[in-house]
Image: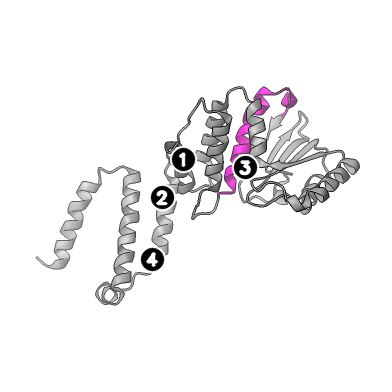
Amino acid sequence: MSTAELNTKLVDSYLGFLKHLNPVGKLDLIGKLTQSVKSDLQSNENEFEESFGAWDENDDAEKLIDEIRGSHQIDLAKPFNLPITTIIDLLTKHFTAKYSAEGVSRLPVLALYAAYECLVQETKRFENKRLLTLESHTSADARSGRIGDIDVVDENGRAFEAVEVKHGIPISAQLVRDAFEKFKTTQVKRYYLLSTANISESEKESIDAEIDRIKNIHGCHVIVNGLTNSLAYYLRMIYDTALFIECYVNLVELDAALKYEHKKQWNTIISSM
């Protein structure tokens, strides 16, 4: 039996065993085989090229694995009866974990949106108000016609409240001015500018001055704050924080901007509680 025939027979035999693996197991195996090939290439690249031809598809293989993983629905943990401080700690870890793929800036937006899903159902302020569906992560505000990442409208469809979320960018006076440009032609009552990096300490006075200026010429109350501080405040207003967790996890599971690693990280964080 030739070497090629033996290899083919071995591959067929292995496939017979592997067909019983679940999709996640198969994906992990693909990843490990890809790493094995990389290791072989690095240790004996010239010999490998002479025998089989150069391997130029490493990046494509990894992208394919990510795409397959991203399309695979995984069940995410939904813990309940958690103290608010614990929930904030879990969310912070989810926002700040190290990821290789883009999309992490979507996570704090989803967390705020989950809070609003609860608040519009429970608080009198949002009686007869409607929370608009989330736009895609890549939709530009000017193109979509929205004034924030999260928008609430009144019974007539007019802007009532909006939230703009920044990830890793401290709030500055310029960001406040940029926000005003988005909503100045509307009659929005409140506009929140929230950041995971909090407020720039060196610009507090100029930020306050800009907020006062907008209030005087427009009437909108601009509120700037650290994102987790606002989340903690919202969670204290929600009757059952388990509903917030359920809303957040559902959004994470379904959001197209997030990759497999963003979703899997949530389960990793929960399992290490």
The kind of residue tagged 2 is Ile
Task: Give the vertical position of 100 relative to 258 (above or below).
Answer: below
Tell me the tag on residue 269.
1
Name the N-terminal-most of marks 4 and 3. 4
Which residue is rendered at x = 80% and y = 51% of the image?
177
Q: CA distance from mark 2 to mark 4?
A: 16 Å
Residue 70 horizontal/vertical position (percent)? 45, 48
Mark 2 and 4 residues: CB-CB less than 8 Å, in contact?
no
Task: Give the vertical position of 112 relative to 42 (above or below).
Answer: above
Disc number lying in front (1 or 3): 1
Mark 4 and 1 residues: CB-CB less than 8 Å, in contact?
no
Residue 199 horizontal/vertical position (percent)? 72, 47
The residue beneath circle 2 is 68
Q: CA distance from mark 4 to mark 1?
A: 33 Å
Q: CA distance from mark 2 to mark 3?
A: 25 Å
Q: Quadrant of the N terminus?
A: bottom left
The residue beneath circle 4 is 57
